[in-house]
Structure formats: C-alpha cells, structure tokens
Image: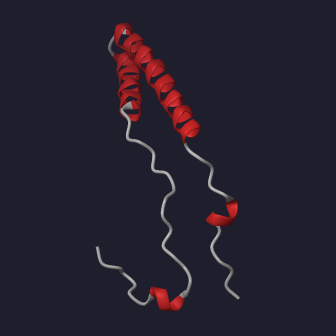
Amino acid sequence: MPDPLPDSNSAHAGWNRAQPDLIPEPTIWPAALALASTLMLWGLISSWITTAVGVALFLIAITGWILNIRHERKQSTPVPLARSLPPQVL
C-alpha cells in the first residue's frame, strides 16, 4: 500500500512509523465467548438446558481466554518506556 503522506518524512525528520512490538496470536476464545453469551440469552426464552450449556461454555471460554492471555504475557518481554515515546519536537 502506498504511503498516504509521501512528504511525511520531510515534515518530521527522524521520526519512524510506529510498529507493534507484539501482535497477539489469533484464538478461538472470543468467538466461543460470544456463542456462550448467545446460548445463555437464548436459553432464557427457550429452555434451561440451553442456558446450562451456555453457562458451561461461558466458563470454559473465559477460563481459556484468561489462561491464553497469561501465557502470552509470560512469553513477551516488556517494552522500555524510552523506546515507546516519540522524540521531542521543539
């Protein structure tokens, strides 16, 4: 994709485009949590069995997502604050 501002380097000499240091891995947990919420709400108007399945899936999904986040944080290294701040413009 071409740079939308071709003269941006000349306007801010020494600046670079921000790049993410760590991109999270794609997971199934957000979709599972959405399905669980749907089943719980659908179960309120249809049957208690659907609600129970939704609650069980909700607990599994939220636990899986939290464990996934904790696992990713253990593997990542913190970004020093000085590296994340833009250079001072006077």
Q: Which colour scheme is used?
A: secondary structure
Relative to the observer, which residue lies in front, 83 or 55? 83
Relative to the observer, which residue lies in front, 67 or 47? 67
| Residue sticking out furthest to the left | 1
On the picture, is 3 further left or further right than 71?
left
Q: What residue is at 36 percent from the left and 32 percent from the top?
A: 28
Pick the quarter of the image with the N terminus.
bottom left
Residue 53 pos. (x, y %): 37, 13
User: Which of the 4 image quarters holds residue 15?
Assistant: bottom right
Image: 86 above or below 83 = below
Image: 50 above or below 66 = above
Image: 45 above or below 66 = above
Image: 56 above or below 29 = above
Residue 5 pos. (x, y %): 40, 84
On the picture, is 38 further left or further right than 18?
left
Q: What residue is at 38 percent from the left and 36 percent from the top?
A: 27
Q: What residue is at 47 percent from the left and 86 percent from the top?
A: 9
Q: What residue is at 41 percent from the left and 26 percent from the top?
A: 37
Residue 41 pos. (x, y %): 40, 23
| Residue sticking out furthest to the top | 49
Relative to the observer, which residue lies in front, 65 or 88? 88
